[in-house]
């Protein structure tokens, strides 16, 4: 966990006070809604279909038990008893009253949580691998660098009014759990041939109306230069990015239109003027940030404790959960546990206030008081002793977050859709709920294997449908909800954009179409461990298209 200092606390508290005055002026009529809009957006407040929505930042996805309890308090006191975890390590509350927003933010500020820059044309919440600092084989803890970037970006005067929103993601593992290729800037920490630690810098990724995967602009930038290099990218974007057309304002469009080589030339010329300047990171500065992160005092434990061995042998339900939801840890005797927020018939990413309180308690008991939020809209306990796994499983099962479906077909990424969002064309949540029911049988889900379904209610792609193994996009046709289906997308280190299968289908046919695609996959795969995305890559979409539209 990172320990905020007095400066952090002062900034957050002053921002709450400032926003309280802005809300008071809006309520009194001194500010119109149009005048208030830019002010509320910079504090994470959206006006949705039915109410204001508050988006809270969870920097690099790390929460303490005290912070999760405070989120539960906000959900219970100011909302309707729950919150919604998003793909960018935020949490959203969809029913908060405008008059009570400052009080909610003040309550959150007491435990170091804020909503600054979770919206607006600025640098948004810096995201990272949810297993940062505990994943085996990791080159470095990416949260260190995410925190450096967070401090750099917060209230930055030059980059608070960019052409459009701007998103960073960072990973330090071979397997990308942070989806860096669908971000404006993606950073991959690695070692060069000389063994030095630095960054591969990718730029121009993003989904939405015009999806692009990020391209490598520099294969190795030294850690001392990473801030100045990122600023050079931002300066070029700030100068040349479109402000006359919202649909062409993202950096991905600029990179695409200039080409990566021309864009790199512009960045290198800008960087040459500022390299070795004030943004150069000295070793002492990096170590100061690193020293503010506290790590657990791990015990020396058996990596195969008797408690775990006996539980696996005695209870097939525990065995299924253990195989599905428990991952290796860099420290022997410990494990990373993923908590599924995708129960049968539930809303993906939702957690009730009671669940958050219970998870906070379990984190204190079993995970050194730390919780992580993942890109896939699940939570994780990053420091669990393997000997405690049976007891933890029983407790998680009582809370309703032990469904053994992590990375399986019912572990669905889903935006709030037309149930909440004024931008949406179609509902997302009912589709996800129906699919979790269709594939609730664990034997069926395990037979299918790793398969990611992503659902967006509109072209803005908050559900990242472009990079779902199966992607579902809601569209509107003559006042009715239809859905386009893509297959073959993925968001990891081998990121691909999905390919459209065929014409959009009506709401009532979506679950049937997904079942048809899955059945085609099971018939087409050459061996049980051939993943769905690998079959699509080998055969293309035609065999799936034939199956889906044969009787429609």
Image: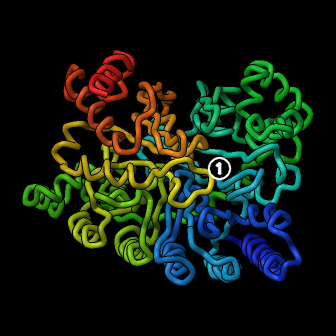
Q: Position of residue 157 (x, y in %)?
A: 88, 55
Q: Give the camera-side residue of 39 and 265.
A: 39
Image quarter of residue 221: top right
Q: Where is residue 356 in the image (x, y as percent from the top left)?
A: 43, 73
| Count of marks placed on residues | 1
Q: Classify 239 as above or below 96.
A: above
Q: Which colour scheme is used?
A: rainbow
Q: Label 1's element? A: helix
Image quarter of residue 343: bottom left
Which residue is depicted at the point 79% across and 24% down? Answer: 263
Residue 108 visible from this viewpoint: yes
Residue 140 visible from this viewpoint: no
Q: Give the camera-side residue of 106 and 264.
A: 106
| Left or right of 269 on screen, residue 152 | left
Q: Position of residue 358 (x, y in %)?
A: 37, 76
| Left or right of 519 on screen, residue 10 | right
| Left or right of 8 on screen, residue 91 | left
Which residue is depicted at the point 77% across and 48% down? Answer: 282
Q: In which quarter of the image is the N terminus?
A: bottom right
Q: Classify 277 as above or below 322.
A: above
The residue labelled by disc 1 is 145
Q: Classify 246 as above or below 32.
A: above
């Amino acid at each position: 966990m990172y320990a905020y200092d007095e400066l952090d606390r002062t900034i957050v508290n002053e921002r709450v006070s400032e926003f309280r005055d802005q809300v008071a002026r809006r309520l009194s009529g001194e500010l119109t809604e149009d005048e208030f809009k830019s002010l509320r957006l910079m504090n994470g407040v959206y006006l949705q279909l039915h109410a204001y929505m508050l988006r809270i930042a969870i920097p690099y996805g790390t929460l303490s038990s005290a912070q999760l309890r405070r989120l539960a308090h906000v959900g219970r006191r100011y909302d309707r008893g729950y919150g919604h975890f998003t793909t960018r390590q935020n949490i959203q509350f969809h029913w908060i009253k405008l008059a009570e927003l400052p009080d909610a933010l003040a309550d959150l500020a007491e435990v170091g949580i804020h909503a600054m820059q979770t919206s607006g044309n600025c640098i948004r919440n810096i995201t990272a691998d949810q297993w940062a600092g505990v994943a085996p084989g990791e080159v470095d803890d990416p949260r260190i660098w995410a925190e450096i970037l967070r401090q750099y970006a917060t209230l930055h005067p030059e980059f608070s009014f960019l052409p459009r929103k701007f998103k960073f993601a960072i990973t330090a593992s071979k397997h990308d759990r942070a989806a860096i290729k669908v971000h404006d800037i993606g950073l991959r920490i690695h070692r060069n041939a000389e063994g030095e630690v630095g960054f591969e810098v990718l730029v121009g990724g993003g989904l939405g109306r015009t999806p692009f995967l990020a391209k490598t602009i520099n294969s190795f930038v030294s850690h001392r230069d990473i801030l100045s290099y990122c600023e050079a990218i931002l300066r070029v974007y700030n100068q040349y990015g479109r402000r006359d057309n919202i649909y062409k304002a993202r950096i991905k469009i600029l990179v695409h239109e200039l080409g990566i080589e021309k864009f790199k030339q512009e960045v290198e010329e800008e960087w040459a003027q500022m390299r070795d300047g004030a943004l150069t990171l000295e070793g002492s500065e990096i170590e100061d940030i690193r020293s503010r992160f506290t790590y657990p005092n791990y015990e020396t434990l058996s990596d195969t404790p008797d408690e775990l061995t006996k539980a696996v042998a005695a209870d097939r339900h525990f065995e299924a959960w253990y195989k599905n939801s428990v991952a290796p840890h860099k420290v022997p005797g410990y494990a990373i546990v993923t908590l599924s927020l995708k129960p049968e018939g539930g809303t993906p990413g939702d957690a009730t206030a009671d669940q958050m309180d219970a998870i906070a308690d379990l984190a204190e008991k079993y995970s050194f008081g730390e919780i992580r939020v993942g890109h896939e809209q699940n939570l994780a306990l990053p420091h669990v002793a393997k000997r405690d796994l049976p007891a933890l499983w029983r407790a998680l099962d009582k809370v309703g977050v032990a469904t053994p479906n992590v990375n399986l077909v019912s572990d669905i990424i889903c935006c709030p859709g037309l149930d909440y969002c004024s931008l949406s064309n179609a509902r997302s949540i009912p589709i996800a709920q129906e699919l979790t029911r269709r594939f609730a049988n664990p034997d069926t889900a395990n037979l299918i294997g790793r398969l990611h379904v992503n659902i967006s209610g509109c072209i803005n792609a908050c559900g990242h449908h472009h990079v779902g193994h199966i992607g579902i996009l809601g569209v509107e046709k003559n006042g009715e909800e239809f859905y386009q289906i893509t297959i073959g997308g993925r968001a990891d280190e081998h990121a691909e954009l999905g390919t459209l299968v065929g014409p959009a289908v009506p709401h009532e046919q979506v679950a049937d179409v997904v079942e048809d695609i899955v059945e085609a996959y099971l018939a087409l795969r050459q061996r049980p461990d051939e993943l769905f995305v690998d079959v699509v890559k080998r055969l293309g979409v035609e065999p799936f298209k034939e199956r889906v539209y044969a009787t429609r």
